Amino acid sequence: MTDLPGIYRMVEQAMPERSCARSGACCQFTVTGREPIVTHAELAAIRAELRRQGRNVPPPREDGACPLLTADGTRCSIYAARPMGCRTFFCREAGGVVTARELRDALHALNALEESRGKNKRPPRPLTRALQDRD
């Protein structure tokens, strides 16, 4: 079994070269119509990063954007701990498409990690909902 940082390294290795401008445009969930789904392990990593920063889980934003954006809404405040869905968001500006086949090993490893954490954990769910859940 691989740990979450190891899984994220697998994702990075599977991805084509990217040129993400880190504008935060992909974090505008109501604009993109897409929101990352997070596993329990990823949620635990996000919460640990927030604790490390001395912060509480932020409330949902009125504009529907990711609540983990910086105050100015342009950068991810937990970038190193961002979930797989954020790491693999395919925007035109970044370039390159990654197929599920290319991410297969990382997806299987993430699934195995979740299974190892126990059957009574909540299933993967949208980031904003997961952040508000008490688990």
Image (cartoon, helix red, strand yellow):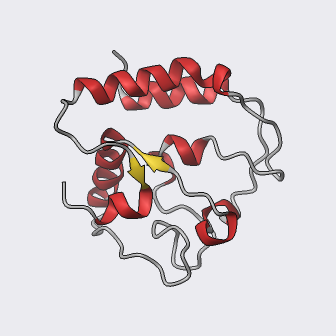
Q: Name the foreground residue: 40 vs 54.
A: 40
- In the displayed structure, 7 sits above or below 131; it is above
Q: Relative to 91, is 125 on the left or the right? A: left
Residue 110 placement (x, y as % from top left): 41, 28
Residue 48 placement (x, y as % from top left): 28, 51
Residue 59 placement (x, y as % from top left): 36, 76
Q: Name the foreground residue: 123 vs 110.
A: 123
Q: Name the foreground residue: 9 vs 85.
A: 85
Residue visible at 81% across and 37% down in the picture: 96
Residue visible at 33% across and 15% down in the picture: 1
- In the displayed structure, 90 sits above or below 116; it is below
Q: Relative to 94, is 37 on the left or the right? A: left
- In the displayed structure, 67 sits above or below 81; it is below
Residue visible at 52% across and 68% down in the picture: 69
Q: Quadrant of the C terminus?
A: bottom left
Q: Name the foreground residue: 16 vs 34.
A: 34
Tell me the quarter of the picture where residue 113 sits: top left
